[in-house]
Amino acid sequence: MQLEIRPDPAEVGRARRWARSRLAGSGIAADEPLAETLVLLVSELVTNAVVHTGCPAVLRLFLSAGPAGAVTVRLEVTDASARAPVPRCPGDESTGGRGLALVDGLADRWGWSPEGVGKRIWCELDRCVTTVDAAEAAVASNCGRTAPAYEGLAYGVYGVYGGLAYGAV
């Protein structure tokens, strides 16, 4: 799956909408943490390509299924600028310069490589369904309650005091 991007800041919103539609078509819900994180990463990488290179770019999205329903989503942005992506250290008052720091903090893996006369920057996110399902099953067995899971960590309530629930499993 790929989307051609013009060197126009308005393309960032179009890229986010495109990524959301591709994820929805693959069975990843829009409100799932993986989808929300991926859309933010799309925004950062496409913004970098549009703002810092002034060149057209290509956004690609790959989904690969692993064992027991695990999924890896790979996002790539290719542009015609040979200039390497450089993480910056913006000041506290700066309104920009944090894109690659966000990518580094949110992606499971990321990197870049030369691509023809330009470059390809990529990042990957993993969704390990087995971990989430196992955690939910373990918590569900606690007094028959079901518990939601967040990124593989299950949580649930085990006590009530004055109408308020306390504790965690």
Image (cartoon, helix red, strand yellow):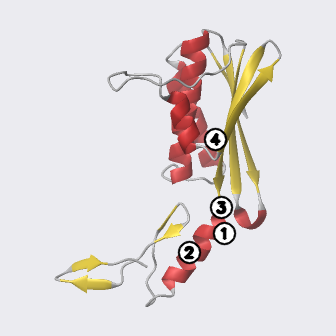
The answer for how far apart the CA atoms under marks 2 and 3 are is 11 Å
Please state which of residues 75 and 112 is positioned toward the viewer in this rendering: 112
Q: Position of residue 68 (x, y in %)?
A: 74, 67
Marks 2/4: CA–CA distance:
28 Å
Tell whether label 1 touches label 2 (CB within 8 Å): no
Query: To which residue does mark 4 refer?
Result: 22
The foreground one among 43 and 14 is: 43
Residues at marks 1 and 4, CA–CA distance in whole angstroms:
23 Å
Which residue is labeled 1 in the image? 130
**For mark 1, does the 10 Å Cα neighbourhood hold few (<14), some (14 to 19), or many (20 or more) residues?**
some
- The answer to whether residue 154 shows anywhere in this view is yes
Q: Residues within 10 Å of mark 3 (few under 14, many from 20)?
A: some
C-alpha distance separating marks 3 and 4: 19 Å
Marks 2 and 4: CB-CB under 8 Å? no
User: With respect to residue 167, does 104 lie above or below?
Assistant: above
Q: Which residue is mark 2?
A: 135
Mark 2, other Cα within 10 Å: few <14 / some 14–19 / many ≥20: some
Residue 122: x and y, percent?
A: 69, 33
Give SS at disc 1: helix
Q: Position of residue 31 (x, y in %)?
A: 48, 51
Q: Which residue is mark 3?
A: 128
Q: Decide: marks 3, 1 in contact (CB < 8 A)?
A: yes
Q: Which of the 4 image quarters holds residue 75? A: top right
Kind of residue sitting beneath label 2: Ala
Sequence order check, earlier mark of 1 and 4: 4
Along the polypeptide, which appears first: circle 3 or circle 4? 4
